[in-house]
Image: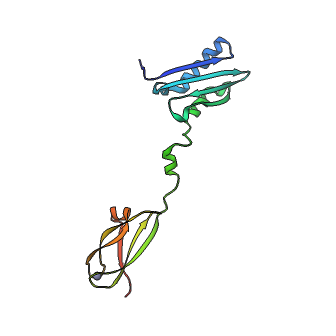
Amino acid sequence: MNNRGRLQILIAGCAPDERKHADARVRASLGPRAGSGDWTVSLVKLKTTWSVTLDGPEPHLKGLSFEVSDDRLQVEIRQALDREPSNAPERAAAAPASVAQAKRSRHKCTMCARPFEVHFDTQPGEREVATAVACPRCWHVQRVPVAEGASATESYRAEATPD
Ligand SMILES: [Zn+2]
């Protein structure tokens, strides 16, 4: 016996045998979800359609209400439950696609005094950290600013540029 969830189904406006049938379809559409918390599903029969109000344990399942035709009852409840929360934080965070920009920064070797460029990708607003880079001419290692992500994954390269 699973006591974690409580499912309450309120049905009004229809004959007893129809009520039984609707109750069974609500249970079928919830399936194992019924055990995930407290649910209240209320159905009111309006001639040929059902007015459905759903209260589930998750924020995006609170006070969902919609109208469905009798033959679509089970399908529509399931679809309402499967719908992604429209304002879930993880979706909001994923929405702005990260736009990496290729950056090249110019430096002068502290040993041989000849110029080189360091190439790496940077995200908008990403900070840069001092990173050990070898001069492409004399291999003297010096610290130059590189985007944090590129620095951490060592995805940067130094190229000699003309004097
Ligand atoms: Zn050098």
Tell me if 16 is positioned left or right of 39 in this view.
right
Tell me the quadrant of ligand 1.
bottom left
Q: Is residue 122 above or below residue 29?
A: below
Q: What percent of the width, then of the height, locates residue 123?
A: 45, 63
* 13 relative to 154 in the view: left or right: right
Give the x, y percent position of residue 163. Answer: 37, 88
The residue furthest bottom is: 163
Question: Looking at the picture, how far across and down is residue 16, in whole percent?
Answer: 64, 11
Identify the image's colour scheme: rainbow, by chain, secondary structure or one colour: rainbow
Q: Kindly give the residue lying farthest to the right in the view shown.
A: 47
- Residue at horizontal 32 percent and vertical 68 percent from the top: 130
Left or right: where 73 falls relative to 8 = right
Instruction: Give the total of numbered labels.
Output: 0
Quadrant in which the N terminus is drawn: top left
Q: Is residue 27 above or below residue 125?
A: above
Picture quadrant of residue 122: bottom left
Identity of the residue furthest to the top in this view: 16
What residue is at 44 percent from the left and 71 percent from the top? 103
Residue positioned 64% across, 12% down in the render: 17
Q: Quadrant of residue 117?
A: bottom left
Residue 58 x, y percent position in the rendering: 50, 33
- Which is more toward the observer, 38 or 17? 38
Residue at 52% from the left image edge and 48% from the top image edge: 92
